[in-house]
Image (cartoon, helix red, strand yellow):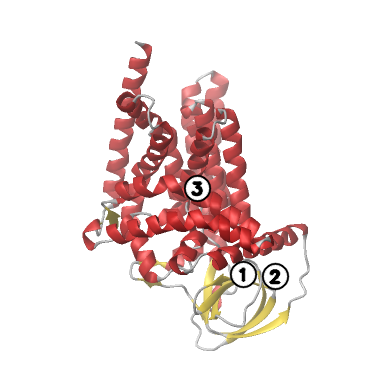
Amino acid sequence: MGFLMVGVLVVFIPLLLGQRKYAVIGFCLLALVLGILRLEISQFNEASDQVRKLNDAPEKITLIGQIISEPDIRDNSQRLKIKISKTESIVLVTIQRYPEYHYLDVVEVTGKLKTPGVFEGFNYQQYLQKEGIYSVMDFPLVELIEENHHYTPTTFLYEKILWLKHRLSEPLNTHFSGPDSAIMQGIVFGNDKNMSDGLKEQFRITGLSHVTAVSGSNIVILISLFMSALLALGFWRSQAFYGSVILIWLYIIMIGLPVSGIRAAIMGSVALLAQHVGRQNTGTRVLVLTACLMLLQNPLLLLYDIGFQLSFLASLGILHAKPLIDYYFKIIFKERFKSFLDIISVTFAAQIFTLPIIVYNFGQISVIAPITNILVLPMIPLLTIIGFAVSLVGIMWNVTGFIISLPAVLLLAYFTKILGIFSQPWAVMTLENISFGWIGIYYIVLAIVIWRLAKYQRQNFVQ
């Protein structure tokens, strides 16, 4: 509390004396103190969680609660987020694939509570901690208590969105087979759970995993791809901007409003707004403010949510690196291949800024990712549009949906060929035990390079 009072005084006293630069230091100190305070509140909530205190006990316990999100269905299992009725604690329960349960069902589970562990370098406990989940239960006895849902306006709307998502997914499974179906599900709905392990490995090796996942960089790149596609179709820049924002939020609604997608869409929309008005510096401030508001709601995102980190950095890349890449592309290529080069600049800008985080967390980097992204990304907007068209039309007219799907079959044949050619062992470089200090050095050097290039560009523009 003492630091908080000092922060407030350091802000207001310089403002009263007209010393604004010292007030900025005070604001930074105040923000730091508030951030620490918010983190401590989050840690207190975890420590006081009633169900967490029962973790790792030798006896089985019985809990009753409601499923609060869409069940995560895998090949042989499903995962349910259950809010316990009496304590408001959330438990992640893994059960058999059948019978199926649904959002808002009330269930009784009997089994052993466990603390999430660490598996092969992946800290599952921290991954769940950011979502307020401190306990897991594997394959308990489950009994359905109630499936007559009691709605609030929010839960009613969310359930209808999930229903629409499932209905739209059915035509993709009907008109595409094997890996094509899984790829289209990933591109259109961000659902890569139906992919085989071999196919996921191909995407990882080729550096294309972001294409089929609701990740920060995926959403940010997709927004800019929509922008480029609309400009290529002849829309004015202002029309393309508003159209891209509308399309990305329709996309987020269609895929079931995942939290990671919402965060990435907010940041991507902010980056696109800054790019639209031509104010990178203002856009950076708004982006940082957006990130601060998200962290105020959940401070653990900064520490444990890789998607949050990637979406923030990808947005920064589009704000600051993309204009520079566009500038040099214009010098080299003049006005030729503008739409295609815009896609490349978006991708490179996002990947330059997110590369260290990817390497630090996953220990590997695809050395051929720039090539595969150039070969594949230009078709992603078209596959997305065709996928949505097949989903919408296929619900009502099965034959028409099949006809619309035919161009996508050809594009997917090319896509899978690229995956097959480039998913070779030599295409991945392993970088284990990367020190966090190297990440800091990378971003310091990157900031200096961006600043110098931007300064050089401005000088040439003035001349």
How packed is label 3: few (under 14 Cα within 10 Å), some, or many (20 or more)? Answer: some
Q: Mark 3 points at which residue?
A: 382
- Foreground tag (2 vs 3): 3
Most extreme residue toward the bottom, as rendered?
59
Label 2, label 3: how far apart the Cα atoms are:
36 Å
Q: Are marks 1 and 2 in contact (CB under 8 Å)?
A: no
The residue that mark 1 highlights is 89
Residue shown at 52% from the left, 24% from the top: 14
Q: Position of residue 79 (x, y in %)?
A: 55, 74
Q: In which quarter of the image is the C terminus?
A: top left
Q: Mark 2 points at which residue?
A: 104
Q: Is mark 1 on a helix, strand or loop?
A: loop
Q: Which amino acid does label 1 sit on?
A: Ser
Decide: few, some or many residues near mark 2? Use Cα within 10 Å; few <14, some 14-19, many ≥20: many
The residue lying at 55 percent from left, 29 percent from top is 237
Check disc 3 and report its element: helix, strand or loop.
helix
Image-based side of 453 in relation to 9, left or right: left
